[in-house]
Image: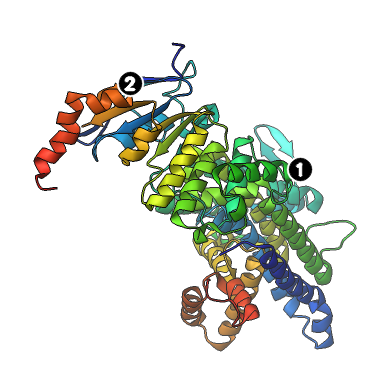
Amino acid sequence: MADPLLTCEGLAKAYGGVQACAGVDLALAEGELRAVIGPNGAGKTTLTGLLAGELRPDAGRIRFAGREIQALGAAARARAGIGRSYQITSLFPRFTVLENARLAVQTAAGHAFRLRPAAGDRSLETAAEALLEQVGLGARAAVPVADLAHGEQRQLEIALALAGRPRLLLLDEPTAGMAPEESRAMVALLQRLKSGVTLLLVEHDMDAVFALADRITVMDGGRVLASGTPEEIRGSAAVQAAYLGGAAGEAGPC
Amino acid sequence: MADGLGRRLGGHADGLLLGLAFLAWPAVAAGFGLEWTLDLAARILIYALAASALNLVLGYAGLVSFGHAAFFGAGAYVVAILAYHDFLLGPIVLFGLEIPGTGNAWIAFPLAVLVAGLLALAIGALCLRTSGLYFIMITLAFAQMIYYLFISLPDYGGEDGLSLFARSELRPLDLGDDLAFYYLCLGLLALVLAGKAAVVRSRFGWALMGIRDNERRMTALGLPPYRYKLAAFALSGAVTGLAGALIANLTEFVSPAFLSWPLSGELLIIVILGGMGRLYGPLLGATAFLLLEFWLKEWTEHWQLALGPILVLIVLYARGGLGGLVDLLRRGREGSGHG
């Protein structure tokens, strides 16, 4: 196999006494879709924060596309090719769908110290429209974001993350809070994206995970419990015991 | 609230109407023997200019600066100190260099803008490492430092301030003529508003609004917010310095009051009163604020006691300030549900 696109070694982050990530090792091959699963508090969201540069690791190294990036801030990592979406929808609610996409495109296009009006700038709006088309929001361009359905907001969330043409996309629970139908549409969208970009997908919806993932990493208590193909993970006794089985054992009737 | 085209044109209509009123006012005032109001009207324009500069950071970048008096006062003092050296003290000696003073506005005004801009760059570079309440307090702290610095400079009048012996020279205009000075203020305000309209619509303006609404998301998209906020802050400070240069000429007197925190507060009130993030909000706000102040002062010396509740009512019931109120009234019953 060629050099991995992303590797991290011994990535650690503690909040007070709680070890949210306790030495995470991970390697992502270019083009793969990696799902990260685990119970609440396993450290999945902390991991995405560390990879995106929003959180500073206490220890550990991150290599991305042949370069050490743990010292880079979030903006620099985004420009280096790491895009992300948020578990809690994070958009510009006062703007329309097109304005959101245009803002993301202009940011990706580099510095913004220019005096031409941004609205009506074809070089921006063509790219923004293509982006919306890609996630299935082409017909909703003029709608204020506040008026979008939840599922559509999640789609726009993906569009913004794609604007910088990232090589790696970090998706934190893209189907969070979605109705089953919206969830299916999101899975179809991710399926389409899969061929063009490496994806790290944090997800609770197991149907989505097993439908999409090339490989699955299971986390628990801030550590990687197991990594493997969906079949391996499904068959792993350790995963069964610690994650699926463990939860069932504790919760009893649930 | 949608930032649609109709709203933008609507905003322009209001602004142009108000602008025309100011354009025509000297003629109207002359007709009714109200020439004395020119001074008040010029003051409104100057405060509107300063508040427009503040609006760039407050309304578009979401930065609550409680220290803009520092830039206003800096602009005023640059003009006054240069004139004072020209007239009385002889050249300014700085690091062994002799710099002649000047009463020439073509030199003094750009210098006022430059000094205020550099001051804002320095203060902003430090303050913008904080945010929220800390940012408010630290901008206030820096402004107070400048205030006390000028109080402790006896050469420049200390607490008593400094008188100008004449208004700046701006050939071919004669600023000693109140009418010419009034139209200079109006022209500069129009220029600043046109410039601000361009900035706000540009990629830079959108980046600022993006930072205001969701800084975390902008960062994740690859934009380093600090640089953009600093650029906006320095630009805002520079334009505030121009307002300071004008106020020094209007009153032909500068004092540390121009640097004091109540002035920073008044500028904030004017922006909020007119409507944050609205192009003409500061002009609307300055007009309302200074007229209210004027009338209430006629009526009682405790004018602030009456002004306070009026401001509270407007802020409580007219979200978007007076600008929002105007929008609401124009649209009448048809579509005022979302405001």
Tell me the residue that label 2 is attached to. Answer: A60
Structural crowding at the residue carrying mark 2, measured as other residues with C-alpha within 10 Å and reported as few (<14), some (14–19) or many (≥20): some
Drawn side of residue A114 relative to residue A252, left or right: right
Quick check: can you spot residue A106? yes
Quick check: can you spot residue B125? no
Location of residue B279 with respect to A111 vertically, above or below: below
Drawn side of residue A157 relative to residue B187, left or right: left
User: Which kind of residue does numbered mark 1 sit on?
Assistant: Pro
Structural crowding at the residue carrying mark 1, measured as other residues with C-alpha within 10 Å and reported as few (<14), some (14–19) or many (≥20): some
The one nearer the camera, B197 or A143, is: A143
Q: In terms of image quadrants, where is residue A50?
A: top left
x then y, percent, for residue B301: 52, 83
The one nearer the camera, B6 or B211, is: B6
Q: Secondary structure at mark 2?
A: strand
Location of residue A36 with respect to B175 vertically, above or below: above
Q: Secondary structure at mark 1?
A: loop
User: Which kind of residue does numbered mark 2 sit on?
Assistant: Gly
Q: What residue do we see at 15% from left, 39% from top?
A: A247
x then y, percent, for residue A10: 30, 20
In this rendering, do the residues under marks 1 and 2 share a single chain? no
x then y, percent, for residue A201: 39, 34
Chain bearing tag 2 is A
Residue B100 numbered tag:
1
Q: What residue do we see at 49% from left, 45% from top?
A: A157
Q: How many marks?
A: 2
Q: What residue do we see at 56% from left, 84% from top?
A: B296
Location of residue B16 with respect to B56 vertically, above or below: below
Chain bearing tag 1 is B
Q: Residue furthest right?
A: B172
Q: What residue do we see at 48% from left, 52% from top?
A: A153
The one nearer the camera, B150 or A136, is: A136
x then y, percent, for residue A224: 26, 25
